[in-house]
Structures are given as C-alpha cells and as structure tokens.
Image (cartoon, helix red, strand yellow):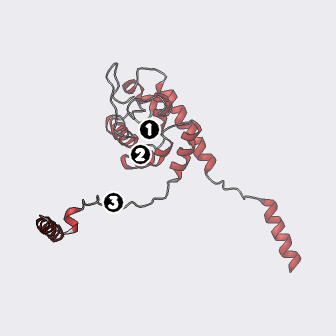
C-alpha cells in the first residue's frame, strides 16, 4: 500500500510540475500608466475657493477646469451653479451638485463627481450656451424655477473672479524700498 501511495504522489507531482507555473497562478490585472499633470492656476484658485466652503468638490477643481476648456464654457459657471444648487456639493444627491435632471420626485444621479462635472458642462454648452443663453441671467428661466437663480450664480462667478484677480501678480514694482537699497549698496561698493 505504501508503494501505491508513493507512486500516486510521484505521478501527482509529475503532473503538477508539467503544467507551467503561469497557468496555475492567476494573472494580476494590467497596470495602467498614470502621468502627473501640473495643476492649472485656475484649478488652484478654485480648489482654495471650494475649500473655504468645506466643499467635497475641492479635489475636483482640475476636472471643472478641464471640462470647461473641453466644451468652451467659462470655468467659473459649473462650480457657481453647484454653490447655488447644493452649497458646493454638501447637499447633493448621487454626485449631482447642480440639480441637473431633478424635477419634483425625479432625481438624476451620477457615478462620480467627475462624471457629473463633465455631463453638466457638456449639457450647459449644448442646451443653453449654443442656443444663445450664454450667462446665468439668460439661463435662469430654462434652468431653475427661482427668479433669483441667475443672480445667485452670477454672485459666485463674480466672487471667484475676484479671488482669481487677487492671485494674479500685480504689474507694479514689488518693493521700491528694496530696489533703492540695492542701488545704494551698488553705489557704495563702486
């Protein structure tokens, strides 16, 4: 009986060794290459702005800018709408911070924030901007029932624009005192 067991184990080991190791070990999923991208200056401004509201959309700032550039929409419009519709995503349904496709009890959700950003940006371009409704006041009637919606969206867009202007370097000389001190030091050395 011992000889049968040894023969059986030998045959089993021979069989297992004949099949390649690659066939027995499941393959790891392919690794996708991810490239780092420099964050756009507008996205940096937007991220800081959204952070000041403790918004869950803060880390989506680059997606807002990329979608706006892709569809030719003002980069401040879609974030501003989220400010009005959901307090910048804090009171949203299914990654829908824009009230997009929400009518009464009907509610449209998105798979991710990025999906929502791109869908809403494309929809604004196609259904509003391309039809001549190029700014929030003109969009108001078609987008929202509230007569103050356009004013409130414009408020956030203007506020974001002011933040952007504060971040841009001024064209004035930075420090006249420092320039004078350097010039004086150069005269003293010569």
Q: As displayed, is residue 29 above or below residue 55?
A: below
Report helix, strand or loop for mark 2. helix
- What residue sits right under mark 1 in the picture? 78
* Discs 2, 1 touching: Cβ within 8 Å: yes
How far across and how far down the image is residue 143, in percent? 38, 27
* Displayed quadrant of residue 29: bottom left
* Discs 2, 3 touching: Cβ within 8 Å: no
**Mark positioned earlier in the residue sequence (2 or 1):** 2
**Mark positioned earlier in the residue sequence (1 or 3):** 3
How far across and how far down the image is residue 137, in percent? 45, 29
- What residue sits right under mark 3 in the picture? 32
| Apparent side of residue 10 relative to residue 189 in the rendered image (left or right) | left
- What residue sits right under mark 2 in the picture? 68
Image point (33%, 60%), residue name:
32
Q: As displayed, is residue 146 above or below residue 183?
A: above
Single out the mark in the foreground, 2 or 3: 3
Local packing at callout 3 (Cα closer than 10 Å; few below 14, some 14-19, many 20+) is few
Report helix, strand or loop for mark 1. helix
Q: Nearer the viewer, residue 49 or 24?
A: 24
Local packing at callout 1 (Cα closer than 10 Å; few below 14, some 14-19, many 20+) is many
How far across and how far down the image is residue 179, in percent? 79, 65
Outermost residue, front direction? 1
Outermost residue, right direction? 188
């Amino acid at each position: 009986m011992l000889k049968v067991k040894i023969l059986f184990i030998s045959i089993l080991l021979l069989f297992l060794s004949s099949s390649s190791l690659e066939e027995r070990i499941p393959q790891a999923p392919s690794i996708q290459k991810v490239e780092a991208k420099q964050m756009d200056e507008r996205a940096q401004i937007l991220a800081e702005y959204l952070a000041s509201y403790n918004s869950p959309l803060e880390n989506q700032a680059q997606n807002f800018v990329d979608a706006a550039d892709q569809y030719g929409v003002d980069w401040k419009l879609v974030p501003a709408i989220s400010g009005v519709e959901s307090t910048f995503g804090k009171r949203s349904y299914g990654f829908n911070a824009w009230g997009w496709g929400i009518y009464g009890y009907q509610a449209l959700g998105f798979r991710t924030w990025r999906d929502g950003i791109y869908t809403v940006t494309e929809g604004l371009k196609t259904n509003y901007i391309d039809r001549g409704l190029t700014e929030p006041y003109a969009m108001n009637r078609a987008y929202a029932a509230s007569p103050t919606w356009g004013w409130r969206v414009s408020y956030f867009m203007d506020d974001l624009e002011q933040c952007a202007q504060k971040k841009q370097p001024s064209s004035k000389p930075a420090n006249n005192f420092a320039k004078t001190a350097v010039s004086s030091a150069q005269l003293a050395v010569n």
